[in-house]
Every structure is written in structure tokens, then in C-alpha cells.
Image: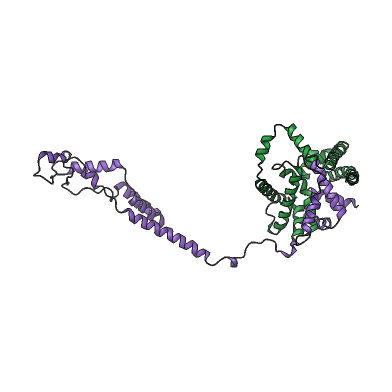
Chain colours: A purple, B green
Amino acid sequence: MNEELDSQLSAMFDDELPAAQCELLARRLSRDESLKARWGRYAVISAVVRAERGVRLNAPLAGRVNAAISAEPALGNHAVAQPRPRSALRWWQPLVGGALAAGVAAASVLWLRAQGPLTTLPLVAQRPPSNVRGAPVLNAGASSASLANASYVTPSTPAVRPMLVPSTQLANYVVAHSMVSSPVARRNLLSSFITSEPPAAEVQELNDHAARTAP
Amino acid sequence: MSADVSDLSLVRRVQRGDKGAFDALVLKYQHKLVKLVMRYVRNPAEAEDIAQEAFIKAYRALPQFRGDSAFYTWLYRIAINTAKNAVVSRDRSPIEYDLDRNSDESYDMQGRMKDSETPEGLVLTDEIRSTVNAAIDALPEDLRTAIVLRELEGLSYEEIAAAMDCPVGTVRSRIFRAREAIDRRLREVFEGGLGRAEELG
């Protein structure tokens, strides 16, 4: 046996042989049975040094695999996996994606419309009459008992609509923001701003202010 | 040296229809694969069956292997999946098996009882192991250090050269000579062992 060849085989087993020499030796290794047997013994040495206990070192596994592979068709007839060409992509795949996006957008618009405009009138209406100075009582001619039970009063001035008009501070922020933001971001900000519900404390403050300033 | 070059050159040959190159890959990795599968099944014979199935699956799937990962990494995944499927299909869980195992001693006893089904296999395996270990012990210090650093520690030739303070070519030569010395002893055992197995049969 050529010593240089065996030395190359040892280096190839360790994955330390240059690629060009590997190609040549792989060709020879696949055909030369004595070289293959030596290769197999190198693997046995490796298994022993690594103390792979429980593994039968003389198992006829390679022979059994070889027999099974012999019955298989050679792989040379198959093309090695390559990236799929673009022409193979189905033409309707981009359309499905667009249709899905449009559907989601339409559902979002419908849902927003179904929510309707926000109103706070019931909050104002439930204020006790004694707290509203000069507010005309609807059923002025009724008895005091019925007056005490009355729960609906109409403010003399139109109620402030705190929900529909943004506060000055936020409006200023939107204007300032619109100078630097993109149209899409601006629209999103406005949408969320209009549909958002202000905190209850702010509503209470506005209602108190309306009550105080009422004639 | 780029990793996995030798495996890749063998894989490319198999992909071009050279079945003999696949034998070399099986010979190289059969012990590692059986050892891997034995994490799931303790019976060596069953582990060999599963490893065989994994190798055949790998052969059939080889046209899809592009070399993005190392061949053994790819083979490892196939073997793990095959072992898991085998355990599930036989309704046998490795955890249940571990519960039966009280200690390493009892495991060794179980392993030996399984191996006793093929006594000649057990004798040969033990003989191979003791022969290789004796041959390694008999090596000169520089050869033994080189082969152990390579096989046990998994160091590259360059790393071994740095550790042993010698050129890479010397490392390659030392590892080759160590393997040759062990292989000479091993061949005698294999030839004698095969003859004895025939007698036993």
C-alpha cells in the first residue's frame, strides 16, 4: 500500500485534506475495497478512543446498509436540490395576499363605523338639579316630591361636548406632529385620537366647568 | 482547512450516483450514530436497526442535501427523528426505561444481558477495545499525544501543532503513524475474530 495514499486517507478522515485532493481520494475510496476497509478501521479506532461504550464495534451495520442501498436506484438520475425557479410560483399567490389585506382593512373600517360617535350626555343628565344653578326644570309645575325624584335636567346652555373636540394641548400636538410625520402616520394618529375615550376625570372637570359658567 | 470538505466530496459523489462513496460515509459514522440512537433505545441490536433505517433515509434524501450544514449534523437530525418515531411506534419511552434503571451497575448488567444474545459479538467488541487501548498505550509519547488530542479532544491539526509546538505537517505524520501502528494490531484481531466467529457459527 502506498504510504502517501494512506497518509492522505488519514488526513481525509480528520477532514484535514485539501479539497482538490479530497475529490481524487473520494473517487478512489469509493472503489477500492482495501482502502475502504482501512477507512472503516480508522473509524473503529476513533470509537474506542472516544469510549463509545455499548456500541458493537464489529456490527455488520455497514454491510446491511450497503445491501439495502444496492436495491435503491442510483441518485445520479435525480437532480440535486436547487432553489425553485420563479416561473414555478403560482400566479395567484400575490393576488391572494392582496385580497387578504383588503379584507382585513374593510373589516376594520366596518367595525369602527359600528362603534358610532361617542356621547357623554347621560353623564351630564344624571347630575342632581340642586347642583345646577338656574337650570330650568322640565316639569316646573310638578309637586316637590316629584321634583325631588326628577332626574333629568336640561342645561341652559348647550352641554360642552368634550368627547368630540380634542383638547387644545392635544390639538397643538397633532398640528406640530403633522409637520414632521408622514401622511400615513398622521392619519393613524388622528384616527386613534378621535376614537379614543378621554379619562373620566377630564369629563368630570369639563362638566363642572360647564355648571359653573352656566347663567 | 474548511470543515466537512471530505464528507462533502463523498456526498457529491453519491449525488452523482456513486453508491460506493456512501459506504465510506456509513463506515465513518456508524458507531457515532449507533451511540446517538442508544440514548433512546438501550438495546444495541435495536439501535443498529434504527441507525440502519436512518442511513437509508439519509441516502434517499441526499438529493435534497445542499451542504448548507455539515453532513453529520444533517445525518444526526435524521437519526434523532427516526429514533423518536421508532420509540413512539413501539410505545416505549426512554424515560420509562430510565425509571427501571436504578444504577449504572444495573444498566451495565442489562446491556450485557442484551449483548449476550450474540456472545461472539461481545467477545469481539471487548477484544477490539482492549487491543486498541493496548496499542495506544504502546505508542511513543508524541504519537499518543497527537492521536488522543485529535480523537478525544477533537482538536484540529493546527490546534494540535500549537499545543505540541511543532509544524502542522508533523502533526499529520504523527497521527498517521499512530493510526498505522494501531491498525496493524487491529487487523490481526479482525482477521482472527472473523475466523473465530465462523467457528462459533
The image position of residue A173, as x and y in percent, is 34, 49
In which image quadrant can residue B38 be found?
Answer: top right
The answer to whether residue B197 is above or below residue A93 is above
Q: Residue at x 89, y 50 (%)?
A: A3
The image position of residue A10, as x and y in percent, is 83, 48
In which image quadrant can residue B46 be found?
Answer: top right
The image position of residue B113, as x and y in percent, is 78, 37
- Residue placed farthest to the left in the image? A141
The answer to whether residue B111 is above or below residue A181 is above
Left or right: residue A201 compared with residue B145: left
Residue B62 versus residue B54: which sits nearer the camera?
B54
Residue A71 versus residue B169: which sits nearer the camera?
A71
Tell me if residue B165 can be seen: no
In which image quadrant can residue B122 be found?
Answer: top right
* Number of numbered tags placed on the structure image: 0
Left or right: residue B175 compared with residue B39: right
Residue B39 versus residue A17: which sits nearer the camera?
B39
The image position of residue B199, as x and y in percent, is 91, 45
Tell me if residue A60 can be seen: yes
Left or right: residue A214 compared with residue A82: left
Which image quadrant: the C terminus of chain A? top left
